[in-house]
Amino acid sequence: MNYIVFDLEWNQAADLRTRLENSLLFEIIEIGAIKLNENRDQIADFHELIRPQVFHTMNQVTGDLIHINMEQLADCRSFPEVAADFLKWCGSNYIFCTWGNLDLTELQRNMDYYHMPPVSQKTIKYYDVQKLFSIAFEDKKSRRTLQYAVDFLEIKKDVAFHRAYADAYYTAKILAQITQTKVFDNYSFDTYHLPQNKSEEIWICFEDYAKYISREFPDKSTAMTDQKVLSTKCFLCGAKTKKKIPWFTNNGKHYYTIVRCARHGMIKEKIRLRKSENDQIYVVKTMKQANPEIVQDILNKKSQIRNSRKERRHKSSREDSSSTLGLP
């Protein structure tokens, strides 16, 4: 299997009116990629600028960052032509690798805009090298800039940053320096295309946590009454658990619970409700063992919510009393 390490540069509307007139938020104007073999040695590269067809003025912030102007793009090929050649260049047996989680989504969104055949009709498994860097070299949680990682690993900076080919090149260099095999168990999933039914839903167990990605639901209430979404079985052994802190939310989008497995102890579960490309709802749920500090953090969250609700009720009650008495 080959690794396709790619990066995109995109332009966006230069003014509010142009943005409101177009359904495409980011228009890809450059694709850069490095192909690595199974040993993560470079075997090929791809780079091409793209002629804009949506935004004909360069956004000032974008232009200042990537140092590309419209004159450089005028004689380039269109996105459908370049993207088709890029995917052909990728081959058949590969996995995408990116720095961060945006590029693969924007590639598919631009392809949809031009009615191109999809990369896949299913949720795409890929490597987020930014995440892998954190797992391999830092605390698993931090998300560093590409330049930070290059400096950290003392990689020679022989091309300028903030261009598609350069950023793909450095991302590939970082990927090649990750030698711990277990790090590559940490796949990411691009959710531009979601599971279509229950059988396609994603359930994956990593070293210290598990993740579930649902199919689409028409609304939040339907999602939050689904048995699989609300299931609190132990992700390690599948046994039933006992709820210690029932499901609660602090913002209507994130839900938390603490349960106890007789074999594996306390477990924290978190539900994130997200909006799909079709304006429906899907669920990303994570499960991990919870030490006393994590349990206390969840208790604190619930206590803060309870106190905030009390304050709102008291404030509302005082306002009602003042209104009844005719006080200002």
Image (cartoon, helix red, strand yellow):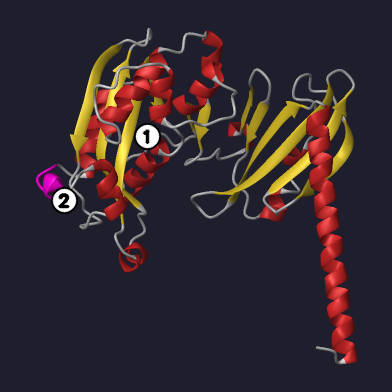
Q: Nearer the viewer, residue 161 or 295?
A: 161
Determine whether 156 is above or below 276 in the image: above
Are the residues flagged by discs 1 and 2 in contact, CB closer than 8 Å? no
Left or right of residue 35, residue 310 in this image: right
Residue at point 17% right, 47% down?
51
- Give the quarter of the figure containing the N terminus: top left
Answer whether residue 225 is magenta in the image: no
- Secondary structure under tag 1 reads loop
Residue at point 51% right, 39% down?
191
Note whether residue 220 is visible: yes
- Give the quarter of the figure containing the C terminus: bottom right
Magenta residues, start to end: 70-76
Answer whether residue 71 is magenta in the image: yes
Quadrant of residue 46 within the rendered picture: top left
Q: Which of marks 1 and 2 is in front?
A: 2
- Secondary structure under tag 2 reads helix
Please rate how many residues cluster around mark 2, counting C-alpha atoms within 10 Å: few if below 14, some from 14 to 19, many from 20. some
Residue at point 65% right, 33% down?
212
Left or right of residue 236, residue 313 in this image: right
**Measured from the top left, where is residue 155 in percent x and y?**
35, 17
**Measured from the top left, where is residue 148 in percent x and y?**
42, 27
- The label shown at residue 70 is 2
Q: Mark 1 points at which residue?
A: 119
Quadrant of residue 153 within the rendered picture: top left
Q: In the rendered structure, which amino acid carries the disc numbered 2?
A: Met
Q: In the rendered structure, which amino acid carries the disc numbered 1?
A: Val
Q: Which of 112 and 266 is in front in this view?
A: 266
Q: Which of 134 and 156 is in front in this view?
A: 156
* Distance from the alpha carbon under mark 1 to that under mark 2: 28 Å
Mark with earlier residue (1, 2): 2
Determine whether 115 is above or below 267 in the image: below
